Image: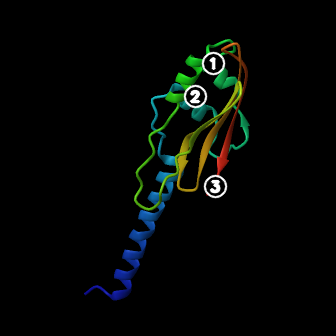
Amino acid sequence: MVSKGRVIGVLFGLFALVCLFATYDFSRGRATESDSPLVGDLLSATKARECGRDATEIVARYLPIGMGQAEAEKILAQTVIRAPTPWFWRPVNENSTVWNGDSLEALRTIKITAFGNQLLRLYLGFSDGKLHKLAAEVICRFD
């Protein structure tokens, strides 16, 4: 006959394995789903714990200086990810765009985990309908 202690031990071990799998899956193991090549390049260039990284060089490949304003807005609109659908936490997908005269500040989520998000912060300056200034960085939010 099986003892109660052994059954409790096996159940506790199974619970620990499920928790370990879920933690790995939603922290480092799950790949972000996106159709945007910009998001893919950013995630391949940044490490999981790298926050405050300058991403201007990577973003400049997709938003070169001199690009038209409408084209740049279209690329920004395509820079989105499909949030995961976990069962034990609620993902926060932050995407915002704020205009201040001829400058644009955009915030796009590029990776969502159970422990925090990686966001792309973009500053775009336009002059005569063309992109004149560009700055980008990857930041982390732990909520």
Q: Quadrant of the C terminus?
A: bottom right
Name the secondary structure under disc 3. loop
Q: Is residue 27 above or below residue 133?
A: below
Using the numbered discs, state the Cα–Cα distance from disc 2 to disc 1 in whole angstroms: 10 Å
The 10 Å Cα crowd at callout 1, few under 14, some 14 to 19, many 20 or more, is few
Asked if disc 2 and disc 1 are in contact, CB closer than 8 Å, the reply is: yes
x and y percent of residue 121 in the render? 66, 36
Which amino acid type is shown beneath numbered disc 2? Answer: Asp
- Residue 129, percent from left and from top: 66, 14
Check disc 3: other Cα within 10 Å, few if <14, some if 14-19, many if 20+: few
Q: Which residue is mark 2?
A: 41
Place residue 137 in its image quadrant: top right
In primary-sequence order, the first of circles 3 and 1 is: 1
- Residue assigned mark 1: 61
Q: Which residue is mark 3?
A: 142
Question: Could you tell me residue 82's position as x and y percent?
Answer: 44, 40
State the residue lying farthest toward the left.
Answer: 1
Q: Nearer the viewer, residue 34 or 78?
A: 78
- In the visual, does 138 lie left or right of 71? right
As drawn, 37 above or below 106: above
